[in-house]
Image (tube, rainbow, N blue to C red):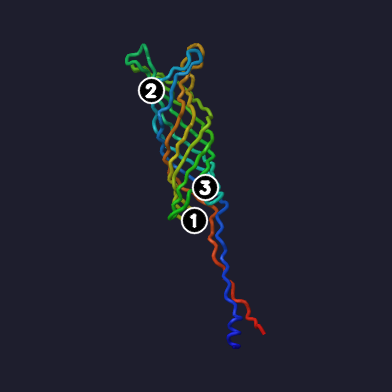
Amino acid sequence: MSTAAFAADLPAPVIEHIPQVPAVGGWYLRGDIGYKLYGDPNGSFNDSVVGDLRYERESMDNAWMIGVGVGYKFTDHLRSDLTLDYETPAKAKGYAVCGGCVGGFSTESTDIDVWTLMLNGYYDIGTWNNITPYVGAGVGAAYVRTDSTLSQNPGGTTTAYDGAHAEWNFAWALMAGASYAVTPNWSIDAGYRYKNLGTAKTVKYYNTGSGQTRSEFADLSAHEFRLGVRYQFANQVAAVPTYFPPQPITSNY
């Protein structure tokens, strides 16, 4: 009986499980490269006296982009970053009716390059096998610059207009993609982004008495396919169970 009583007094080891707390903050850096597929803009020959003369058709070349950014991860699902992108020059063309020209159309062209500063927000849907798909949106400003403006008649006469013109426009974007965590700090990011950049205006290149004539290419929009890397400074550390040794044996008598 004393042996049984003594065994009953032995306390069992206490195992305390500390719950895993989701990451609540962490800065990260990012870098991206990508290729932009521009849609055809809405072009016009704008004059304050004559009015806007729409081009018969428009086209725009594709371009490359490179970008950097800094961001913050608020929770396991929500993060935000501020990005700066540069997009290489792409040639935009508008084809205008030329009544006195053989062939009927003149070609008005300019090179457009863009800097964009965007504030973006993302929702990370979840993580499976180190792959995290996400969706997001962004707003910001686009510095749209035109240069190398040309006017070419069907007969071969080409006029070049010196100087560049630049303006800040409102810009917005929608994005989706997925990241792959190579290590706890480094991730590879592959994504798609639709971006709207506003209007590009050329230098004044034809004087009808008003001095306000220029080409405009409105509704600049592009489909971007981006590949980048992210470096996360802060990482979630999984909590491990803490084991407490048995307490001293006490007697009931």
User: Reading the chain from its start, which is encountered first: label 3 or label 2?
Assistant: 3
Measured Cα–Cα span from mark 3 to mark 2: 42 Å
User: Reading the chain from its start, which is encountered first: label 2 or label 1?
Assistant: 2
Measured Cα–Cα span from mark 3 to mark 1: 14 Å
Please report the residue visible at 37 percent of the width from the left and 14 percent of the height from the top: 98
Q: In the rendering, at what x and y percent does residue 221 appear?
A: 44, 32
Write down the residue under mark 2: 57
Q: Say what amino acid the circle numbered 2 marks.
A: Arg
Q: Say what amino acid the circle numbered 1 marks.
A: Pro
Write down the residue under mark 1: 184
- Secondary-structure class at tag 1: loop
Q: In the rendering, at what x and y percent does residue 159 appear?
A: 41, 18
Tell me the crowding category of disc 3: few under 14, some 14 to 19, or many 20 or more residues within 10 angstroms, Cα based: some
Measured Cα–Cα span from mark 2 to mark 1: 50 Å
Asked if 5 appears above or below 159 in the picture, the reply is below
- Secondary-structure class at tag 3: strand
Write down the residue under mark 3: 29
Asked if 12 appears above or below 102 in the picture, the reply is below
